[in-house]
Amino acid sequence: MKKWLKVLLITLGSIFGALLLIFVLLMIFTPEEWLEEQETASEEQIADSDETWAVYAYMCGSDLESEHNAVSLHLNNMMQVRLPDNVKMVVETGGSKKWSSDWGNTDYLTRHVYTGTEKQLIEQLPSASMGDSGTLEDFLLFCRDNYPADHTMLILWNHGAGSLGGIAFDELYNNDSLSLTEIHDALSDVYRPTDQDKPLELVVLDACLMASVETASVFSDYAEYMVGSEESMYGYNIGRIMYEIAGNPAIETETLGKIICDNYVEEESDDGKNATTAMSVIDLDAIDPLLQAYQDMGDEALRAASRDESFLVNFQRNTRRAENYGGNSDEEEYTDMVDLGDMVRKSKDMFPESSERLLKCLDDCVVYKVNGEYRAEATGLSCYYSLDSEMGSYMMYEDIAETEPFKYLYGYMLRGHMSYEGEQYLKQLGCDNLLSVQTTEITELEGIPLKSNEQNEAVLELGTEALAQVEAIYNQLLLIDTENDMLFNLGYNNDLTADFESGVFTSTFDDTWGTLDGHIVYMELVDEQEDYEQYAIPILLNGEHYNLRVAYNYDDASYEILGARRDLGENGKSDKELRMLEPGDEITTILMGIEANGGEDFERYLVDTFTVAEDTAFERKVLGYSNYASRFLMKDVQNRNIYSDFLQFQVY
């Protein structure tokens, strides 16, 4: 079944979806009133300024260009902005299998300079991966030597994959990407900065998930400010950026950063894509104090873990409640990016010595931010946290970790023992070895029986000893298809009451489940905050696999469809396009099924197909007549899934 579905997902291309996306791109990047006003506004303003600007744009086209013409649309739109003689834009393109304009070429790396009202082809270089440190270094060296200016900006444009996956995925070279280490190597080989003279005034990361403390640290010696997004994002309007500079070359860098963020919100507001916006302007001069506070918090964590065996599971439990970005669930896969400030806030009582100072340093560092309705807890910078508990991901983090104590702590959580380097670090702190990692391998919770109370609700009694190994618990629903001898997993949610002091958990399932236009769906709870929660729902959208995001707002007890994104790509790259549902789209629901007798793993089954209408909505509806089963899904500190026994019931 898996093989058949994989072939289906690959072969059923969505021509309609591609055409629609191109239409949306054209609508977004068609000049509006600000562009019509630019011709006179810039001429009036630049007359009094002789300050020079050079914008260096490193634009890896990848599938964004080959499938959607995105680079060409961005740059053609930008060319409608008239630049004064003291403002230039240097562009390097590559990394795409197909180009819709002469901005790029599949056989070469291409460099253009846009001055005044026209672009000039400067050179074509032999093909090379834009995900290679040497390619970025060569571009920066070229810009430094040939296009110096009073003010310089670097734009890195493409997919982003957070602190672990980096940026600029070159589809000509097996999606090779620039890691944070490679970016740092390129910068350090080109520039010799000082505290008083940083070579770049502003770095704009036009890619998903890149506003992290690890990323900011990489640029802190080389740039004054950084603009980026904690969450997946659509993209900044480069034409608008150049318009603002052309109209006022003396513009303050911080002000320009704020305009970039605000303009993103303005352009996406009509399309309803702002609900999960989380963008920020970072003062990179304030990064070092933040990193020191982060280091001190890590030291405090190690000391606490050496004397309190419940520390790790409680810290994991709190951090899992922090806002996370790009998808961090079994269905969506993991980016391991959480909001730094929200992580600290939710564990504040666990860090009495360092939490307040870290939050103060973070506030000093983030000089501006914009948050969508369902990203209200974002504080401006994310950080790595091992949500997936995969050693491969952690080993990538080891290479870029900015805090030694958290590097050792996370490694200990995953391995169950401290590394030699970690042991030496503990001795410096005056600590003995950490207490044992409490995992479910110790207490064998798999298949623990359930009880039924007077209201026929499922009750799980873990007790305090077993509870020490469980950091998260959910209610899972299964459909029993007796006619076909199948069992379908419908997903999990938080329909339960939890008493973490006694270790007693009670299902509050009310015979309702999530539906799209009445069609039952598989749904995973992926984000739970005080005012809202979010679910991921796997679907086929016009034949392509997407995860639909749905939010529940506690204030008005309503659900809202936020949009759909493709799965995380190779190396964790996040889809830059939030796809809104449109009338006429075809949706096929997917359930996770297994043979009731003899099945080994749940597989994806295509279930219902229907057409999106103007009033298509997500709703909780009473389940149809059938046999069902509920059970509890538990996760331990190493993210292992443990399931209780089933409790079967019927819905009439």
Image (cartoon, rainbow, N blue to C red):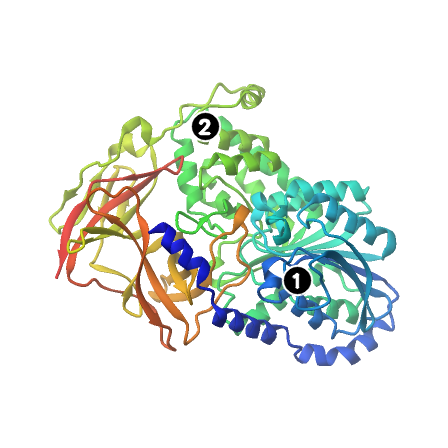
Residue 238: % across, % down: 69, 66
Residue occupying the point 71% across, 44% down: 133
| Residue type at tag 1 | Lys
Tag 1 residue: 258
The numbered mark, 2 or 1, whose residue comes first in the sequence reads: 1
User: 510 and 415: which one is in front?
Assistant: 415
Left or right of 364: which side holds 83? right
How far apart in space, not on screen, are marks 2 and 1 (Cα)?
43 Å
Q: Is residue 632 above or below residue 19?
A: above
| Residue type at tag 2 | Arg
As helix, strand or loop, the secondary structure at mark 2 comes to helix
Mark 2 neighbour density, 10 Å: few (under 14) some (14–19) many (20 or more): few
Residue 143: % across, % down: 82, 54
Residue 463: % across, % down: 24, 33
Please say whether residue 402 is visible from this viewpoint: no
User: 289 and 643: which one is in front?
Assistant: 643
Give the quadrant of residue 599.
top left
Left or right of 354: which side holds 49? right
As helix, strand or loop, the secondary structure at mark 1 comes to helix
User: 119 and 260: which one is in front?
Assistant: 119
Give the quadrant of residue 370.
bottom right
Tag 2 residue: 415
Q: What label does residue 592 carry, if any?
A: none
User: 420 and 330: which one is in front?
Assistant: 330
Mark 1 neighbour density, 10 Å: few (under 14) some (14–19) many (20 or more): some
Residue occupying the point 78% across, 71% down: 247
Q: Is residue 338 above or below residue 75?
A: above
Residue 197: % across, % down: 82, 47
